[in-house]
Image (cartoon, rainbow, N blue to C red):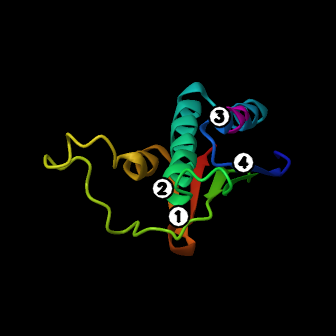
Amino acid sequence: MIPARNETLKINSKPDNMRLVERLIDDVCQVFNVHEDSYGNILIAVTEAVNNAMYHGNKNNPDKFVNIGFQNSDKQLIFSISDEGNGFDYLGLPDPTDPANIEKISGRGVFLMKNLADSIEFEHNGQTVKLAFNN
């Protein structure tokens, strides 16, 4: 049985802090012996969630924070990302695969997270996203 771990990381909404998020992901994946394929999914989904929290949630305000939480169970690794914004309509997002949206340079983050994580949940009107990855 794998011992339970619960960690949090609080960072300012500054792009330079992404390296701290990447280090957390690297450490978690190493400790839990995550397969290379799953590592890529975790890295992309979690960093996308943090980027969205910084850019969309906190409006790139360096005085606002993003909280990244991690916990594990025997079957899953779960990352929780929260910002200080007002949330968003996560149910009404345009489909980035629609031909009308293909040329747009943004709008793919939630789509990526949904397709890379084994499950995704939004809480607090979209201020928090929980990404679960099966072990």
Query: Where in the figure is residue 12, as x and y percent of width and height?
Result: 69, 49
How dense is the environment of label 1, judged by Cα within 10 Å: few (below 14), some, or many (20 and up)?
A: few
Residue 25 figure quarter: top right
How dense is the environment of label 2, judged by Cα within 10 Å: few (below 14), some, or many (20 and up)?
A: some
> Does 114 sit above or below residue 14?
below
Residue 27 figure quarter: top right
- The residue indicated by pointer 3 is 16
Q: Amino acid at mark 4?
A: Ile
Real-space Cα distance between discs 1 and 3? 27 Å
Query: Where in the figure is residue 48, as x and y percent of width and height?
Result: 51, 43
- The residue indicated by pointer 2 is 56
Relative placement, left or right, of 34 versus 51 is right
Q: Amino acid at mark 2?
A: His
Relative placement, left or right, of 117 versus 17 is left
- The residue indicated by pointer 4 is 11
Is 124 one of the magenta-colored residues?
no
Q: Nearer the viewer, mark 1 or mark 4?
A: 4
Mark closer to the chain start, 1 or 2? 2
Q: Write the start and end of the magenta stretch as one range.
A: 19-23
Q: Residue 121 shows which numbered tag?
A: 1
Real-space Cα distance between discs 2 and 4? 15 Å
Is 20 one of the magenta-colored residues?
yes
